[in-house]
Image (cartoon, helix red, strand yellow):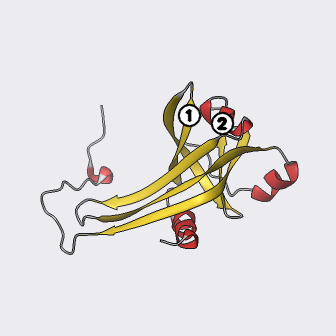
């Protein structure tokens, strides 16, 4: 896929949940985030921790989002490689407005991070032409409530 096609997939994805890959304490770490696409960059909010540290150091990071349908053996994956940077300009943050969704985890997420893309790659998988019946399909709405 071309980079602009990849960004279109990321912008259209609902829910907007992706994974940020960072190096933390000399080890790779992958962390989920709620994100938005703003001016061709990935933007998310975070609190203290590995993601904020990476942004303050303008460290190289990777960001990944995918959509997979196992029963049809198809889907797509997009990876954005770049560096993280802390958005500290009130002007830029005010332009974000309500673009950023509320994080699912209730915690302080005061810092805005931008991943400036240096390379964007995407892959579309369309191997299956007929539906597989041996792959379980989960409809969480139909599952009984937990006790």
* Residue 75 position (above or below residue 114): below
CB under 8 Å between discs 1 and 2? yes
Left or right of residue 36: residue 135: left
What residue did someone put label 2 on? 54
Q: Residue at left 72%, top 35%?
A: 57
Q: Quadrant of residue 76?
A: bottom left
The crowding category of the residue bearing disc 1, from other C-alpha atoms within 10 Å (few below 14, some 14 to 19, many at least 20), is some
Q: Position of residue 12 (x, y in %)?
A: 53, 67
SS at circle 2: helix
Q: Is residue 95 above or below residue 1?
A: above
Query: x%, y% of residue 44?
Result: 64, 48
Mark 2 surroundings within 10 Å by alpha-carbon count, few (fewer than 14), some (14 through 19), many (20 or more): many
Residue ID at (55%, 48%): 62
Q: In the rendering, at what x and y percent does residue 93 appear? A: 80, 51
Q: Name the one closer to the observer, 66 or 58.
A: 58
The reply to whether residue 133 is visible in this rendering is yes
The residue shown at (72%, 45%) is 85
């Amino acid at each position: 896929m071309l980079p602009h096609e990849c960004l279109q997939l990321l912008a259209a994805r609902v829910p907007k949940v992706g994974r940020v890959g960072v190096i933390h304490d000399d080890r790779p770490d992958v962390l989920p985030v709620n994100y938005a696409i703003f001016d061709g960059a990935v933007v998310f909010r975070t609190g203290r921790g590995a993601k904020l540290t990476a942004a303050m150091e303008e460290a190289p990071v990777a960001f990944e989002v995918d959509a997979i349908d196992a029963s049809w053996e198809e889907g797509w994956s997009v990876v954005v490689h770049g560096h993280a940077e802390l958005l500290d300009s009130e002007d830029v943050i005010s332009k974000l407005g309500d673009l950023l969704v509320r994080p699912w985890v209730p915690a302080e997420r005061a810092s805005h991070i931008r991943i400036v893309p240096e390379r964007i790659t995407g892959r579309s998988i369309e191997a299956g032409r007929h539906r597989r019946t041996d792959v379980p399909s989960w409809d969480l709405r139909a599952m009984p409530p937990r006790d």
